[in-house]
Image (tube, helix red, strand yellow):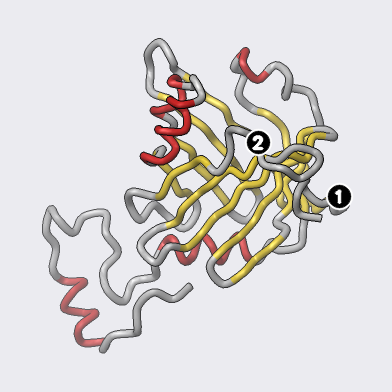
Amino acid sequence: MIRAAPILAALAVLAACSSSPESEGTPLEGDPDPQVEFLERLSELCGQAFAGELVSDNEADADIAGQPLVMHVAECAPDQIRIPFHVGDDRSRTWVLTDTGTGILLKHDHRHEDGSEDTVTQYGGETGDPGTATRQEFPVDDESIALFEREGLSASVTNVWAMEVDETRFAYELRRPPGENERFFRAEFDLTEPVETPPPAWGSE
């Protein structure tokens, strides 16, 4: 996941001493890449599963509230991590994080029990800024907007997803800005106590 070769220490010092409005919020050369660190944090959890709970209270999520939630860091390749998200006995959802070299792309892989793709699948977005080592945000991309509009899900065209990971917690989040289609979904998972590995996500057997 290393995206740039190390530079001379002298250049690093010069870079650290210079700043401009354009460079604010952008990692300096030689500094750790927060997106690389974020993916490495997730990779360290590979093979483990963790129980969680819904901490938001949107009425649209009433069918999820109260059900057992489990996230499983199932597959970790050098440039991609796949995390099935199980809701009770429903194993249809997998979060797919891909290192594109310029950012992190989040896609939602939705499957039916027979392994076939759902009509609404492979949607998501790519990071628009470096984020931090513990939180990354994914604004909806043009491909997903087209999919949502085609499927009559126009409320979703302003989606912004986020993931957080630190020493004790992983979180998955969906937000829409205030207004008619305002939305907030957040599930948090306890990383201090791994649980039994669940069956594979549908379509990945």
Q: Nearer the viewer, residue 134 or 122?
A: 122
Question: In what element is the residue under mark 1?
Answer: loop
> Relative to residue 16, is residue 200 depicted above or below?
above
Q: Could you tell me residue 13's position as x and y percent?
A: 21, 79
The amino acid beneath tag 1 is: Pro
Q: Could you tell me residue 170's position as x and y percent?
A: 62, 47
**CA gap, disc 2 and disc 1:** 19 Å
Residue located 75% across and 37% down the image: 112
The quadrant where residue 56 appears: top right
The residue under label 1 is 199
**Quadrant assignment for the C terminus:** bottom right
Q: Nearer the viewer, residue 3 or 192?
A: 3
Residue 132 as seen in the image, left or right of residue 106 = left
Q: Could you tell me residue 106's position as x and y percent?
A: 50, 49
The residue under label 2 is 118
Residue located 34% across and 84% down the image: 6
Crowding at dot 1, Cα within 10 Å, few <14 / some 14-19 / many 20+, comes out as few
Q: Could you tell me residue 77's position as x and y percent?
A: 61, 69
Residue 20 as seen in the image, left or right of residue 102 = left
